[in-house]
Amino acid sequence: MSALIELKQVYKAYANQTILENISLSIEQGEFLTLLGPSGCGKTTLLRLISGFETPDSGDIIIGGNSVLSSPPHLRQVNTVFQSYALFPHMTVFENVAFGLYCEGIAKNEIHQRVNDTLKKVKLADLANRKPSQISGGQQQRVAIARAIVKRPLVLLLDEPLSALDYSLRKAMQIELKQLQRQLGIAFIFVTHDQEEALSLSDRIVVFQNNQIQQIGSPREVYEKPCNLAVAKFIGEANILDTEIEDVNSSHITATLFNKKMQLKHKT
């Protein structure tokens, strides 16, 4: 089965500064994929390339089996939830969610049906007539998600959507977000620099460092078997042991490291 989205050797630079260097990545239908890395490593730029708000300098982006390099954002079957939510303050919750459908010229009775069904999914049916200023931050986040999923995209792009929430609400929304993704059965591409968030939500994690992909794997794989020192230091609390090579004989080195490991186990 072919991937839902494929990035092939994607390169992007601004003013001669490399932002993304030869990124190749496949996203499968229905998976929760997290792009994890420090600020400035290219995560949001990658979302903008997939959504069509930016164009790669080289490489290809394939969605649903077709290259979309020449397709504008509104013709790609992806929707984005921004960090700031970008809700229209003068519109009600219902009107915010329905806005994209009105722009597409969909019949009013279908719009009402789809919006009401979507608001039920995000547990906001009782707040349909309120303005964004009359609901909480967590509820605003759900409105932004509802506005994106009501158009039935192939994939939902989420650019640090929980970063503006307080700690307890952020934890609650993580659970709701994962439940919603399972219910909808569509792919989520989630951007964060929060390691705990990535480990708790993801089916797979893509770790970025220095504008490149360092490792791709399940949360357990990335946490327990980091591919290099940079990933080990970034993904969690790393125990880095200073060692000294006494002999170039590989079997001797293996035995020495094994003995050190056993000594540590006995100490703990």
Image (cartoon, rainbow, N blue to C red):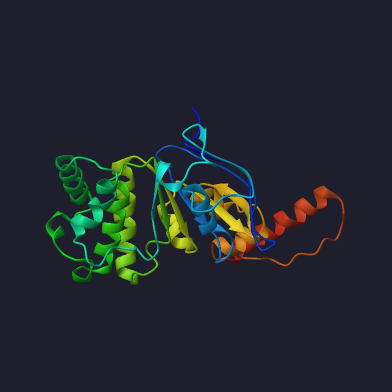
**What is the residue that sits farthest to the top in this orientation?**
1
The residue that appears at 18% across and 55% down in the rendered structure is: 94
* Res 167 quadrant in image: bottom left
Q: Nearer the viewer, residue 187 or 103?
A: 103
Find residue 100 and report its horizontal and vertical position in percent.
29, 49
Q: Nearer the viewer, residue 241 or 236?
A: 236
The residue that appears at 25% across and 67% down in the rendered structure is: 89
Find residue 205 and report its horizontal and vertical position in percent.
51, 50
The residue that appears at 51% across and 58% down in the rendered structure is: 44
Find residue 184 and report its horizontal and vertical position in percent.
30, 42
Task: Please indicate whether residue 5 sits to the left or right of residue 143 in the image.
Answer: right
Find residue 225 and report its horizontal and vertical position in percent.
59, 51
**What is the residue that sits farthest to the right in this orientation?**
248
Depicted 86 relative to depicted 57: above or below: below
Task: Please indicate whether residue 139 sits to the left or right of residue 5 in the image.
Answer: left
* Res 235 quadrant in image: bottom right
Task: Count all numbered tags in the image, as a single digit.
Answer: 0
